[in-house]
Amino acid sequence: MRTPRDRGLTLLEVLISIVVLVLAVSTILPLFAVGSASHKRGIDQAQMAWLAPRVAALLQDRMVETPPDVVRGFVREMEDGSLLIDDGASAGKLKDDGGAAYRFTATFTLATTGGLKDALGPTCYLLKVDLSTKEGGEDRTESYQTVVLRKLAR
């Protein structure tokens, strides 16, 4: 013969199982926030590592005369998903209104040749590009260095 206890779970057993489930979910839930923040930092770092050589190539293409000491600019994502790299040297480009995803500072340093005089003038420079972005009020910076050659005037 069956007793009333054999037909199902009591209210106390259901409440205890709900409490255990809530405790388990509440300990796992913060891990998702940490994981998404870490993913965002990784995406930003990869994007900056991809952008820095492109900024350096753009600046090298424009370097016909002696380069400036410091170039400041920004990189903005356009509506179509393309990226606009603007160093202020071209007319008709967008102005930085504070909404740029990345900002850069590029510095040119003359690469010395051991005291030898070059007939063409200084042609070899060390270019350092510092790309930065803000995340949660904290600056993140990625640096890229390369050697660039000045284009000869035709």
Image: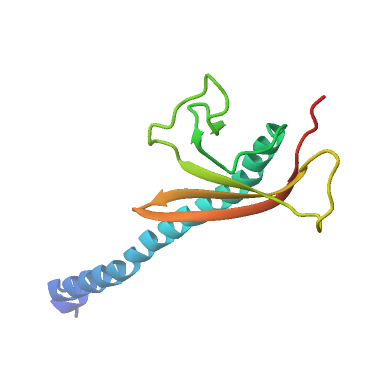
In the displayed structure image, the side of residue 78 where residue 112 appears, left or right: right
Whether residue 89 is visible? yes
- Residue shown at 57%/28% (left/top)? 89
In this picture, residue 62 sits left or right of residue 90: right
Q: Tell me if residue 9 can be seen.
A: no
Going by the image, does 116 lie left or right of 3? right
Percent position (x, y) of residue 71?
A: 55, 40
Q: What residue lies at 30% left-to-right and 67% top-to-bottom? A: 25
Query: Is 103 situated left or right of 127 in this image?
Result: left
Q: How many marks?
A: 0
Q: Judge by depth and name the residue closer to the eye, 119 or 71.
A: 119
The quarter of the rendered structure image containing the N terminus is bottom left
79 or 127: which is nearer to us?
A: 127
The residue depicted at 56 percent of the width and 31 percent of the height is 82
Q: Residue 8 is drawn in which quadrant?
A: bottom left
In the image, farthest residue toward the top: 92
Residue 54 spot, x, y in % from top left: 65, 40
| Quadrant occupied by the C terminus | top right
How far from the left and from the top, in percent, is residue 69? 59, 44
Residue 109, x across and y down, in percent: 66, 50
Q: Is residue 121 above or below residue 7?
A: above
Residue closer to the observer: 140 or 60: 60
The image quarter in which residue 9 lies: bottom left
Its colouring scheme is rainbow
**Compared to 143, does 61 lie above or below?**
above
x 61%, y 39%: residue: 68
